[in-house]
Image: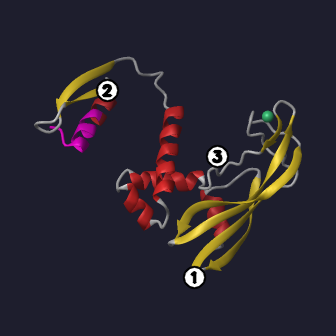
Amino acid sequence: MQLKTILNRVQKFKSFVYQSVQWSESDGVLTLVIEMVARAHSDPLCSGCGRRGPGYDRMETRRFEFVPLWGIPVLFLYAMRRVNCKRCGVKVESVPWARGKHTLTGAYMQFLATWAKRLSWQEVAAIFQTSWEKVFHSVEWAVEWGLAHRDISKVESIGVDEVLWHRGHPYLTVVYQIDAESLLSKTSFLEELGVK
Ligand SMILES: [Zn+2]
């Protein structure tokens, strides 16, 4: 099975294709380099308003870090296009695998943020051979994403409790949603904190 087949299975894009996969070796570090190209006749998406518009020009090739495979770093290479947008003027296109100026793909940030819930950020950085800053930005990104996508429209009632965390420490205020499912999660949340 080819690596492109695997990538298309885990993360397939409508307007972009995985063009080629190559080895790259520098300073003894082996990397998988994946060249991304836009599908023919697909206009770039404006990062200002999210609408498609005619291409304006192409910028320098950027590198985006994807989730490492078998411990081998994986890089996407892509030269971002600029859009001549009717509403916003000339804007850089938005791509589905990364946001803004981030050099890490969303998939990799999600991956690091998930590990950062279980290990210290320093440990995550060491294990995945990345920097503490990149782990930090991944957590920050995941928190922002969570806040932007949370849905509190169905919350009808909340409960507030004061619990004693550890003896000699201040009380902890717990705010929770009252329904069967959320009470269960409140219990496991308190267990995580070591509160009886
Ligand atoms: Zn626009």
Q: Which residue is mark 2?
A: 176
Identify the residue at image location x=66%, y=66%.
5
Q: Main secondary structure of the magenta part?
A: helix
- How busy is the neighbourhood of tag 1: few (under 14 within 10 Å), some, or many (20 plus)? few
* Residue 74 highlighted magenta (yes or no): no
Q: Position of residue 72 (x, y in %)?
A: 55, 73
Instruction: Please state which amino acid type lies under the numbered disc 3.
Output: Arg
Which quadrant does the C terminus fall into? Answer: top left
Mark number for residue 28?
1
Q: Nearer the viewer, residue 18 or 48?
A: 48
Please tell me whether mark 1 sits on a helix, a strand or a loop: loop
On screen, residue 193 above or below 37: above
Whether residue 38 is visible: no
Query: What mark, if any, has residue 97 been given in the picture?
Result: none
Where does residue 173 sit, x and y in percent of width and height?
Answer: 25, 27
Residue 175 appears in view:
yes
Q: CA distance from mark 3 to mark 2?
A: 32 Å
Disc 3 to disc 1: CB gap under 8 Å: no
Seen at 73% across and 40% down, the residue is 47
Q: Quadrant of residue 68?
A: bottom right
